[in-house]
Image (cartoon, rainbow, N blue to C red):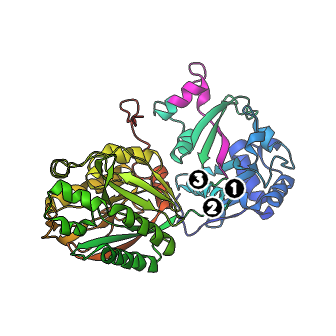
Amino acid sequence: MENKIEQVELKYLSLNDFEDLKEAFVEIYGDSPDAYWKKSELRQLISKFPEGQVVITVNGDLAGCAFSLIVDYNKIDNKHTYDDVAGDAKFKMHTSDGDMLYGIDIFIKKEYRGLKLGRRLYDYRKELCEQLNLKGIVFGGRIPNYHKHATDLTPRQYINKVRSREIDDHVLNFQLANDFRPVRILSNYLEGDTDSKEYAVLMQWDNIYFQKDSVKPSTNKTEVRLGLVQWQMRSYSDLDELLHQVEYFVESLSGYRSDFALFPEFFNAPLMAKYNHLSEPEAIRELAKFTQPIKDKMAELSIAYNINIISGSMPKVINDKLYNVGYLCKRDGSVERFEKIHVTPDEAKVWGMQRGSQLKTFDTDCGKIGILICYDVEFPELSRILALEGMNILFVPFLTDTQNGFSRVKLCAQARAVENECYVAIAGSVGNLPKVHNMDIQYAQSAVFTPSDFAFPSNGVKAETTPNTEMILIADVNLDDLTELHNFGSVRNLKDRREDVYTLERKK
C-alpha cells in the first residue's frame, strides 16, 4: 500500500457494513447472487452470535472479515459440506450450548494483504474460543492451488507436499502457520470451488485452556506460591527444640500464604550429635528413629497452617535396610512418601544407604508435582519420566558440602527446568556441624528455576537466596505460563522429542 496507515480497528459486524462487504465479496468471488452474504443472512448472524462476526478496517475502510458459529461438534458428520453448517439462512446449526467454534468465512481484501491482518482475525477467534471455554476452532479450508496438481496428486499427497514446502499454497500455509492442523479431507465441500476441485481440508485449533464441565468445583490453583527453607545447621538439645524451629519456618511461610514449604535433605542431622561416639552407620540408624515423629508433626503442621509441606529427607529403616526418604504432607491431611533413587558413593560407603525405587508424580491442589532428592536431579531420565506424567513443579531437597557439589545440583536443576518445561525449586542447608561425623560443613544457595522463554526470566532464575545464610525464599509461579510454553514456545522440548529415534520407558 502507498497510503499511510493511521488506524487499524477490529470491531463487531453491523448491518451498516453490508454494502462494503458486498463490494469486497464481489471483487473476490465474482458477482453471482451466491457470491456474497445477503442482508437478511447478516442480520441472522448478528442476532444469533454477535461476538462471532467481526470486520477489520484500515483508515476506516473495510479490509476484511471473519464470521463464525458455535456448533455441537458431535452432531456434525465427518463428511459434512459447507452447506450442512452454513447453508441454512437461519443458521440453525448454531447453538450457544455447543463445544466448538466453526469458521464459516474469512477474507482480507487484496490491497490489504501482507499487513498480517488475517493473523489478527485468527487471534480474535482464538481469544473468543478461550473466553467461551470451547474445545477449539474448526473450518473447511480451501486448497486453491490443488487444481494445478489434481491429475498427479491426491488431496492427501498435495497437503503433505505443501507441509514439506515442496508446493506453495498460500492459504494452507497461512493456516498451518497459525497453529491449525489438518484433521481430514472433505470432498464436495464447497460447490463451485473449481480451484480446490471442491475439496477442503478440515483444519482444527485446540484450546489448551478448555475445561470440561464438572459437577465438582475445581480447587486447583494456577498461581502457586513456593516457600523454600534455607536451613541453618546448628546444635539442638532435643527433638522438641528442632521441631520448634520447623514450626517457626512453617508459620512464617504460611503467613505469606505460601502453598508449599520445602525443607532440605537431612535437615534433622543435628540430632545425630548425641550419637557421635557411635560408628557412622550406627549413628545414622539412631537418627532414623526420629523420622516417624518428625513426619507426624509435619503432617499436623500442614493442616494447622494450611500449607503443603515437603519434609526434605531423612534416614529410615525399612525391613532392616537404611533408605533416604521424605514425605509430602498435604494440607488435606494425606501423607505420601518419596525415596532417593540414586545414593552417592559416600552415602553407600559410610552409612550403608540403600537405593530406593519409588518414582512417582504427586497430585496436589496446585497440580502435579515431582520430588527428587539431591543426587537424583543429576539423572535426567527421572525428571523426564515425571514430566511426561504431567509434572509442572519439581522440588529438590539437597545437601552439599562444597561449591563443587552445589554447582552440580544447581546446574542440573536448571537443565531439568529447560528440558522438561517445568519449574524447579531447590532447597539446601547452610552452616556446619562440628560434632557430627560426615556432616561437618554445608554450602547452599536455594533457588527457583524456570524455563527460558519470553514468559520467564531470561536467565531462567525466578528467585534465589543469599548463599550460606539462613533465610526463607518465596516465589510465585504461574502454571498457565507452562501450558502456553508447551504449545507455543520458541522451542518445544517435550513436543519435539524424536520417538522414532529414541524412547524412554519406566520399568515395571
Q: Amino acid at mark 1?
A: Ser
475 vs 162, nearest the viewer: 475
Label 1 with label 2: CB-CB less than 8 Å: yes
237 sits to left or right of 278:
right
**Amino acid marked by disc 3:** Gly
Q: Position of residue 272 (x, y in %)?
A: 21, 66
Residues at marks 2 and 3, CA–CA distance in whole angstroms: 36 Å
Comparing 263 with 85, the one in front is 263
| Residue mark closest to the camera, 3 vs 1 | 1
Residue 397: horizontal and vertical position, in percent? 31, 61
Q: Which residue is mark 3?
A: 118
Tell which circle, 2 or 3, labels the residue nearer the N-terminal end.
3
Q: Nearer the viewer, mark 2 or mark 3?
A: 2
Q: Position of residue 342 (x, y in %)?
A: 27, 46
SS at mark 1?
loop
Q: Dot 3: few (<14), some (14–19), or many (≥20) neighbours within 10 Å?
A: many
Instruction: Read off the magenta span.
Output: 133-160
User: Of marks 3 and 1, which one's residue comes earlier in the chain?
Assistant: 3
Q: Secondary structure at mark 3?
A: helix
User: In the image, what residue occupies the spot 60% across and 29% down?
Assistant: 146
- The kind of residue on which mark 2 rests is Ser
**Which label sits on residue 218?**
2
